[in-house]
Amino acid sequence: MQIPLSNGGNLYLRGKIDRIDTTTVDGKPWLAVVDYKSSAHKFDITDSYYGLAMQLLTYLDIALQDAVELIGQKNCSWGWRLLFSCL
């Protein structure tokens, strides 16, 4: 993903979404981004608001932008999940 900056430069983001789940509720498509973590991590929406934890919301934004290509639906409702491995 390339984001243009006000100074003429670009910010490049790269990542991999672990899993995308979809379902339909009352005829409306839902999309959820699932992020697996190997260590304890608590997602706090306040951290995302202040730009401190952007990974999960960035993945969700990309998935929603590409929903037609990914799942053949647009205007999806959304959600997210963090899953932890037990090593």
Image (cartoon, rainbow, N blue to C red):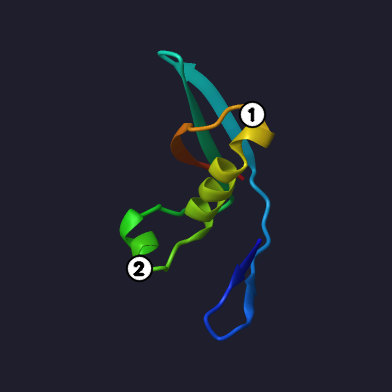
Residue with the most extreme bottom position: 7
Q: Position of residue 80 (x, y in %)?
A: 46, 40
- Residue position marked by numbered label 2 in the rendering: 50
- The tag earlier along the polypeptide, 1 or 2, is 2
Which corner quadrant of the image does residue 15 belong to? bottom right
Q: Residues within 10 Å of mark 2 (few under 14, many from 20)?
A: few
Q: Nearer the viewer, residue 87 or 20?
A: 20
Residue drawn where x is 58% and y is 49% of the image: 62
Q: Position of residue 17 (x, y in %)?
A: 64, 46
- State whether residue 35 appears in this view: no
Q: Position of residue 16 (x, y in %)?
A: 68, 51
- Residue position marked by numbered label 1 in the rendering: 71
User: Which one is closest to the eye, mark 1 or mark 2?
Assistant: 1
Q: Residues within 10 Å of mark 1 (few under 14, many from 20)?
A: some
| Quadrant housing the N terminus | bottom right
Residue drawn where x is 57% and y is 45% of the image: 65
